[in-house]
Amino acid sequence: MQKRSYLGTFGIYATVIFTCAVLLFPIYWMILTALSPRTQLREFPPRFWPDDPQWGVFADLLATQPFGLWMWNTILVAVATMVLSLTVGVLAAYALSRHRLRGGQGLGLFILTSKMLPATLLVIPLFAIFKSLGLVGSLWSVVIAQSTLIVPFATWMLKGYFDTIPPELEHAALVDGCSPLGALVRVVLPVAAPGLAATALYAFVISWSDFLYARTFLTTSESKWTLNVGIATLKGEFVTDWNTIMAASLMAAVPIIGVYLFLERYLVGGLSSGSDK
Amino acid sequence: MIDFSSPRHRAKFGYLLLAPAVIMMALIIIYPILLSVDISLQDVRIARVGGDREPWTLENYRWLTSSAEFWNSLWVTAKMVLTVGGISLIIGLATALLVNQKFRGRSLARLFVALPWAVPEVVATVIWAWMLDSSFGVINWALLKIGLVDQAIQFGSNSTAAFFAVCFVMIWKGYPLVSIMLLAGLQSIPEEQYQAARVDGANVWQRFFYITLPSLAPVLGVTSVMTTLWVFRDFAIIYVLTQGGPIGSTTTLSILTFEQSFAFFRMGQGAAVGVVTLVICAFISRALVGRFANSVH
């Protein structure tokens, strides 16, 4: 690595800071708007610094909108989807990783291609099915619909993690008289724990971001709305109350941004498989 | 009781583990896809499972080929794919090259650069809707301030402006993943190649065009296919920002499918649009799957 000139170093920092500033500006603007007094939002020029932050906006939000309910519904759906896809995904991924099964390769390809299904197509037959099962308006409809994307995704991601664990590990356990399922649960899963955590959090993030399924299946039952449906509805109202919307958006984004900060090294690390070392 | 630890039954154990996933995918993916083809071949308004069914007909596909809405949405989708895909790829590559440099605070920069990826689509869209507001939006204020426009742009009612507004949000939300994938690609290029090129006297541009780009080609291919499919599939950003309007200028195939099925309740026609979209996506992703298939086993 040759030494870079002072000018070059300055150029890199200037570009990095400029790029980050442009990219992060919308997030800053969301926070600023949420905290601004309502009257200030109708002022030109806009203010770029919260002189008078209104922390009461979050209490207002809880008082005037069923925000707590939306948050709770979103959490229920995300947790149920996560548990379901992780359970099914772990078993399938382990089978695909360890056993050379007939049709295994085909299934692998199927899992990969399921990512390309247009969700707006899938939502039509799912609606017909849920209608006949009486599931429209129930949170389960959203859990099942989201699984169409998340189960294949989790399976694929977990297979990648299992592939990195040497099979000698379970062989030793099997020789010691452990059952195959016991070997998976007691030997492989603890070793794969970081991979399990990363997959679970991914599933959580995807579920949390869903709008299409919640919008289609839950629209008519307001008590089942998720955050995204609620926020989109607030935005569609005739008089748009931007600081309430931004406060709601901020609270909807914070858990996911938190998860992301934790996940980030897996995100880059998983894709580059440690070549950065 | 079968003893699964004996080698003879090992495969059976594998199939047993696979069974829940296979059954689930058959029920929630394969069956619905077949059902959607079935619905697209019926003249139905609200599709049901069981009970009376309409006879099969090609009516919906005939409607499709003669409908201006369908051809318009195909054209809108193509324009959007090219705009979003092209710009994401260029600035994604630039960003990846930037954060691949060695400098202090690099991991923090990488963290920030990819942050929009973590913002839920609906949230990202409402933030931009507010920034693009025609009366009090900060973007119109900035454009007026620097004198780029002499009156506020009406992102809600001007077709061209609405189209680019949707593209902006998609790029902001989607390009971080592009730069992460390209960064991973860059990191897998061995440093020795650059050193050898430097010894041979290659300058920065030669190193970029003769080493970086060729080594990155497969990743660039996969990334552009993924971005394309993402634009094809996206619903939340367009629906929340413009609902496909004004006058269809942001109605992609995905939005048209939804609109026909759940706004006009013509599920037969909606399903026909969706099936055509699926076929197009399948052709596009053949490139992707072909590449991945080689690395699967």
Image (tube, grey):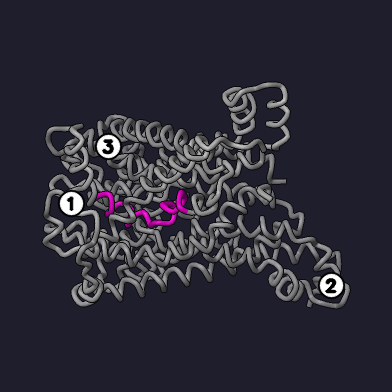
For badge 1, the amino acid type reads: Pro
Are dots 1 and 3 on a single chain? Answer: no
Hey, which residue is sitting farthest right in the picture? Answer: A175
Residue B128 on the magenta segment: yes
Q: Residue at x 35, y 56 (%)?
A: A212
N-terminal label among 1 and 2: 1
Q: Judging from the image, what secondary structure is the residue with disc 3 in?
A: helix
Q: CA distance from mark 3 to mark 2?
A: 60 Å
The disc placed on residue B163 is: 3
Q: Quadrant of residue B48?
A: bottom left
Place of residue B73 in the rendered image (x, y in percent of width and height, measured from the top left) = 31, 35
Q: Judging from the image, what secondary structure is the residue with disc 2 in?
A: helix
Q: Which residues are magenta?
A: B112-129
Cβ atoms at labels 1 and 2 below 8 Å apart: no
Q: Judging from the image, what secondary structure is the residue with disc 1 in?
A: loop
For badge 3, the amino acid type reads: Phe
Are dots 1 and 2 on a single chain? Answer: yes
Q: CA distance from mark 1 to mark 2?
A: 68 Å
Of residue B48 and residue A97, the one placed in the foreground of this image is A97
Rendered view: B276 above or below A276: above
Question: Which residue is identified by label 2?
Answer: A174
Question: Which residue is identified by label 1?
Answer: A46
Chain hosting mark 2: A
Q: Which image quarter holds the N terminus of chain A? A: top right
Q: Residue at x 46, y 40 (%)?
A: B227
Q: Quadrant of residue A247?
A: bottom left
Q: Residue at x 56, y 38 (%)?
A: B222
